[in-house]
């Protein structure tokens, strides 16, 4: 009897069908997984939006322990005489029983001065910072000197008595004839734009002249302390020892840093047509003043600073 051949076609068809079913199953599973991932992402995005809305609606409140407070500490070394800025310090929580006199409000100390050297990490207290420098030597820039000069306090009071620490002045030197003090020989503009370090006298406290330090009553002299170079100190020392002469002081605008050259006013200027000559001098001076005012106005507009002619409180040195 002849042996039958196996049905290979049927077996192949069955295997192919099983393979197709398996592929279809995998494809369906992948589709379901992708759909689930998209749904999960939508849910996560929605939850993130809800959480963000809750955070905005409910601000986070950080409570300070009742036994702690913020104390101001130096973040870098500060030399005596430096002005304190916000870059020099930071606030740190400190037990209330420690450093009771330390500063806690940053706005209270900006613009203060270091009255002694401060190390990094030191607390800022009234013992190391203050509103003004207690020693005049700390207010003098390097290279400059402080010198007191006897200024003639005329009956008319040349500056009106209203010169305060930090003002700028010019010095005039008037000489009279050696054998007759009643006859003035000449008046010269000898120093310009000098910084006033200290003016003696009582302080007036009122709405109109708060912080003004007036000069003493007219007559005699008053010693004003100026910031000068060593060369200026030499010249001033020499002139103060000239017996037939004295200094007068005229106040100038703090916005005016210019210097001018003018010839001394002498007795000979009174001779001849005095009024005509002086009229021309005054006209020339006013032209110079107008031109200077225009220059200053243009500079202030360019810098966007406006008027900086402010009068600070005087800071006399501590006794």
Image (tube, rainbow, N blue to C red):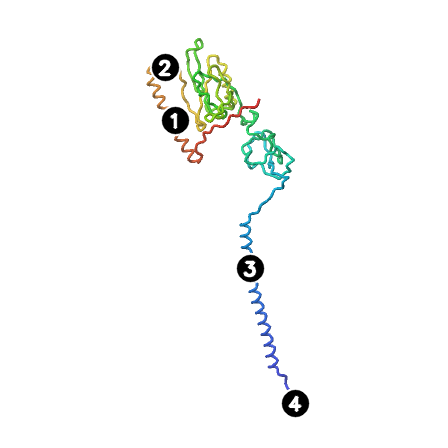
> What separation in Å lies between label 3 and label 1 (alpha carbons)?
77 Å
Discs 1/4, front: 1
Mark 1 lies on residue: 289
Discs 3/2, front: 3
**Pointers 1 and 4 in contact (C-beta within 8 Å):** no
> What separation in Å lies between label 1 and label 2 (alpha carbons)?
24 Å
Q: In this view, does 18 lie above or below 148?
A: below
Q: Is residue 69 left or right of residue 213?
A: right
Residue 1 image position (x, y, % from top left): 67, 91
Q: In this view, does 173 lie above or below 88?
A: above
Discs 4/2, front: 2
**Pointers 4 and 2 in contact (C-beta within 8 Å):** no
Judged from the image, the secondary structure of the residue bearing numbered disc 4 is loop
Indicate which disc residue 2 carries: 4
Work out whether mark 1 precedes mark 2 in sequence or the reverse, and give the earlier one: 2
Q: Residues within 10 Å of mark 4 (few under 14, many from 20)?
A: few
Q: Residue placed at 40% from the left, 17% from the top?
A: 265
19 or 97, which lies in front?
Answer: 97
Task: Please identify the residue farthest to the bottom as the structure is shown.
Answer: 1
Mark 2 lies on residue: 270
> What separation in Å lies between label 3 and label 4 (alpha carbons)?
70 Å
Q: How crowded is mark 3: few (under 14 residues within 10 Å), some or many (20 or more)?
A: few
Q: Residue placed at 63% from the left, 84% from the top?
A: 6
Work out whether mark 4 precedes mark 2 in sequence or the reverse, and give the earlier one: 4
Mark 3 lies on residue: 43
Work out whether mark 3 precedes mark 4 in sequence or the reverse, and give the earlier one: 4
> What separation in Å lies between label 4 and label 2 (alpha carbons)?
161 Å
> What separation in Å lies between label 1 and label 4 (alpha carbons)?
138 Å
Work out whether mark 3 precedes mark 2 in sequence or the reverse, and give the earlier one: 3
């Amino acid at each position: 009897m002849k042996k039958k051949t196996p049905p290979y076609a049927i077996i192949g068809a069955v295997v192919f069908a099983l393979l197709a079913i398996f592929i279809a199953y995998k494809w369906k599973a992948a589709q379901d997984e992708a759909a689930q991932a998209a749904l999960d992402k939508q849910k996560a995005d929605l939850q993130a939006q809800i959480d963000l809305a809750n955070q905005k609606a409910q601000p986070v409140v950080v409570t300070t322990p009742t036994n702690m407070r913020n104390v101001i500490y130096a973040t870098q070394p500060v030399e005596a005489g430096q002005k304190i800025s916000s870059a020099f310090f930071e606030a740190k929580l400190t037990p209330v029983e420690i450093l009771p006199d330390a500063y806690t409000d940053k706005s209270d100390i900006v613009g203060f001065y270091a009255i002694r050297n401060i190390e990094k990490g030191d607390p800022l207290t009234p013992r190391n910072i203050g509103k003004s420098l207690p020693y005049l030597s700390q207010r003098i820039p390097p290279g400059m000197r402080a010198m007191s000069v006897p200024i003639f306090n005329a009956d008319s009071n040349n500056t009106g008595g209203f010169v305060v620490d930090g003002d700028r002045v010019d010095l005039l030197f008037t000489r009279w004839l050696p054998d007759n003090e009643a006859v003035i020989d000449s008046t010269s503009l000898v120093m310009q734009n000098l910084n006033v370090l200290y003016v003696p006298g009582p302080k007036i406290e009122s709405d109109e002249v708060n912080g003004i330090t007036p000069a003493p009553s007219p007559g005699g002299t008053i010693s004003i302390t100026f910031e000068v170079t060593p060369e200026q100190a030499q010249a001033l020392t020499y002139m103060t020892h000239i017996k037939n002469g004295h200094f007068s002081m005229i106040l100038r605008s703090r916005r005016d840093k210019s210097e001018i050259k003018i010839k001394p006013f002498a007795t000979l200027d009174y001779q001849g047509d005095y009024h005509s000559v002086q009229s021309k001098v005054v006209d020339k001076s006013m032209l110079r003043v107008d031109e200077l005012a225009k220059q200053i106005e243009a500079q202030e507009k360019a810098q966007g600073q406006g008027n900086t002619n402010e009068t600070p409180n005087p800071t006399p040195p501590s006794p």
